[in-house]
Amino acid sequence: MDAYERIDRAIDTASEDLRRLSLDIHSHPELNFEEHHAHQALTDFLDAEGFEVVRGAHTMPTAFRAVAGSGGPSVALLSEYDALPGIGHACGHNLIAIAGVGAGVGLRAGLEGRPGTVVILGSPAEEGGAGKQILIEQHAFDGLDAALMAHPAPMDNATPKVQAMQHVRVEYFGRNAHAAAMPWMGLNALDALVLGYNALSVLRQQILPTDRIHGVFTQAGVKPNIIPDYTEALYYVRSATMAELANLKERVKACLESAATATGCRVGIHWEGRPYTDLVSNEPLAERYCTHMAALGLPVGKLPWFGASTDMGNVSYVLPTIHPMFCIPSDPLNANHTAPFTEAAATEEAHERTIRVAKAMARAAYDLIADPAILAQVKADFAAQVPAPGDPLKR
């Protein structure tokens, strides 16, 4: 039996357990950094599989690190398992969780008798918490040669072009007054909030097609006859690259400040959290994934754009990375971050696709470990695409 057969057999053997694990996570949706149930379920599974498991790894109580094998090369397989408020696993992170774990189980079997290390990283808080950037800061990827994960979507795409992104929270501070008796005494923080929103809406006409600005009002006043003295909104600002994001942030800042000037209010602009970088897909590693997906009966193409953000982009600036999207049966009009996609992520068809994706990731990772020529190609592509630390040139 060759390595690919061992990989496929190990993942097929684990498939029913992985299905139960996926449905368990799906039925217990947990938000950023609160994924305690998923963390326990995944680490229990990996412990039973014989991996060396560290729970609460890398300073995060809901992160984990599971290792098998020894020596080099070493490959990381990423699992995500956080959900969205109100709509649960509407991004299919229950499937991402078992894709990474399943691929790790398969890769370990494929490496039987051969040097090489499998590292399964449990990555909390992808939905806005930048869990993988924390893993980077805590040296979770030090000494590794590549990282792989896969994400469900309404389409297949081996090399999605995701956006760099950062959050901005804006506050406006005005002055209360009776809205009917003495409105001239007030400074209307809601007017400032609305003007800022409208300024950003106008800005959208003159930004790049790959830019995105979208937000919600989180505080907008308490009663119609009280002129609001405090309002707040949260926006996500996205661009194709970190350099373009820096430019767009300055333009967003100018719009928000202009609203304060126009209304006489004071403004607080807070760029919060860790930025998400764009994703640098490693072409040789993506080609290996595509080859194996085709062999497994699911050919995958390379689409020019997919508008979203992921902290896997941050990983792609640290070591060679792929983050393919894989299609699960769903209505294209109800894609990720909708309630119908939550339902789709629990179907048997979605599980079957995930199992094949896990096999393709494990096979691609095996190729990198077993073939020095492929590893050299992967490293050369990374060096050509990603600026060295401290390089002033930014993508």
Image (cartoon, rainbow, N blue to C red):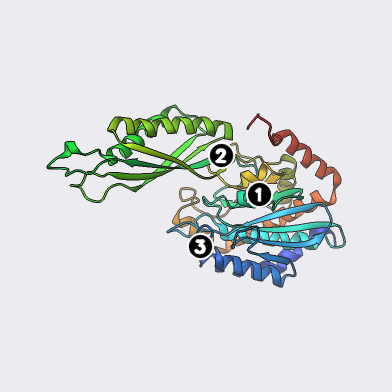
Relative to 300, residue 305 above or below: above
Q: Are marks 2 and 1 in contact (CB under 8 Å)?
A: no
Instruction: Work out whether mark 3 precedes mark 2 in sequence or the reverse, and give the earlier one.
Output: 3
Mark 2 residue type: Ala
Which residue occupies the foreground of this view, 81 or 367? 81
Q: Position of residue 59 (x, y in %)?
A: 62, 58
Q: Residue at x 55, y 63 (%)?
A: 35
* Element type at mark 2: strand
Q: CA distance from mark 1 to mark 3?
A: 23 Å
Q: Residue at x 50, y 29 (%)?
A: 208
Residue labelled with disc 2: 164
Residue labelled with disc 1: 136
Q: Residue at x 70, y 66 (%)?
A: 53
Q: Residue at x 51, y 50 (%)?
A: 128
**Residue sticking out furthest to the right:** 113
Residue 30 badge: 3
Q: Nearer the viewer, mark 1 or mark 3?
A: 1
Q: CA distance from mark 2 to mark 1?
A: 17 Å
Instruction: Locate the N terminus and report the quarter of the image it occupies.
Output: bottom right
Mark 3 residue type: Glu
Instruction: Work out whether mark 2 precedes mark 1 in sequence or the reverse, and give the earlier one.
Output: 1
Relative to 36, residue 384 above or below: above
Which residue occupies the foreground of this view, 35 or 148? 35
Report whether residue 6 is seen: no
Relative to 219, residue 257 above or below: above
Q: Position of residue 179 (x, y in %)?
A: 17, 43
**Residue sticking out furthest to the bottom:** 48
**73 left or right, relative to 19:** right
